[in-house]
Image: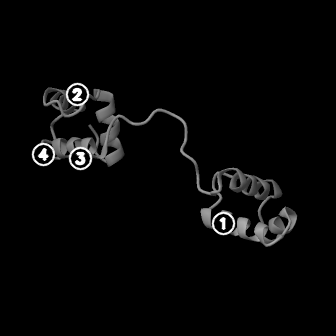
């Protein structure tokens, strides 16, 4: 299944399949590949859902709360470096994050530290 197939389109594929259309007919009707149609139908049969499943990988250490703290500390004192913010968060027992993590989160937010 194409990673960019919209969920609404996936739902249409399942509805057409349940109405008795073949994967070849669905493919021609919606102008998507037959393999994509088959993958969507198989996914629905196994999971009962067409939504994306959670991906593998490590979860982020920073929460929404930590994002706000980093942003606030950076905006209040624009001269603070990422290392200084990380140290403050550790000293105040708010979050145990590295300088690199703070720097990445500032970049995500649109600030540069």
Q: Cβ–Cβ below 8 Å for labels 1 and 4?
A: no
* Closer to the eye: label 3 or 4: 3
| SS type, badge 2 | helix
Q: Cβ–Cβ below 8 Å for labels 3 and 4?
A: no
Q: Position of residue 83 (x, y in %)?
A: 22, 28
First in sequence: mark 2 vs mark 4? 4
* Closer to the eye: label 1 or 4: 1
First in sequence: mark 1 vs mark 4? 1
Comparing 4 with 92, the one in front is 92
Residue 98 in view, yes or no? yes
Q: CA distance from mark 1 to mark 4?
A: 47 Å
Q: Cβ–Cβ below 8 Å for labels 2 and 4?
A: no
Is the residue marked by circle 3 packed among few (<14), some (14-19), or many (20+) residues within 10 Å? few
Query: Which residue sits at x=16%, y=35%?
Result: 80
* Closer to the eye: label 2 or 1: 1
First in sequence: mark 2 vs mark 3? 3
| SS type, badge 3 | helix
Give the position of the C terminus as an image quadrant: top left
Comparing 70 with 48, the one in front is 48
**In the picture shown, does residue 22 fall above or below 70?**
below
Q: CA distance from mark 2 to mark 4?
A: 16 Å
Q: Position of residue 3 (x, y in %)?
A: 64, 51
Residue 83 is marked as: 2
First in sequence: mark 3 vs mark 1? 1
Residue 86 is marked as: none
Residue 11 is marked as: 1
| SS type, badge 1 | helix
Is the residue marked by circle 1 packed among few (<14), some (14-19), or many (20+) residues within 10 Å? some
* Mark 4 lies on residue: 76
């Amino acid at each position: 299944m194409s990673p960019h197939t919209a969920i609404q389109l996936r739902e249409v594929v399942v509805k057409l399949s349940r109405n008795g259309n073949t994967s070849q007919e669905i493919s021609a009707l919606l102008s998507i590949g037959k393999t994509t149609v088959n993958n969507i139908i198989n996914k629905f049969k196994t999971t009962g859902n067409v939504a994306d499943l959670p991906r593998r990988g490590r979860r982020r250490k920073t929460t929404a709360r930590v994002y706000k703290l980093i942003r606030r500390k950076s905006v209040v004192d624009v001269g603070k470096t990422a290392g200084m913010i990380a140290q403050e968060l550790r000293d105040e027992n708010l979050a145990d994050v590295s300088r690199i993590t703070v720097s990445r989160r500032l970049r995500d937010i649109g600030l540069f530290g």
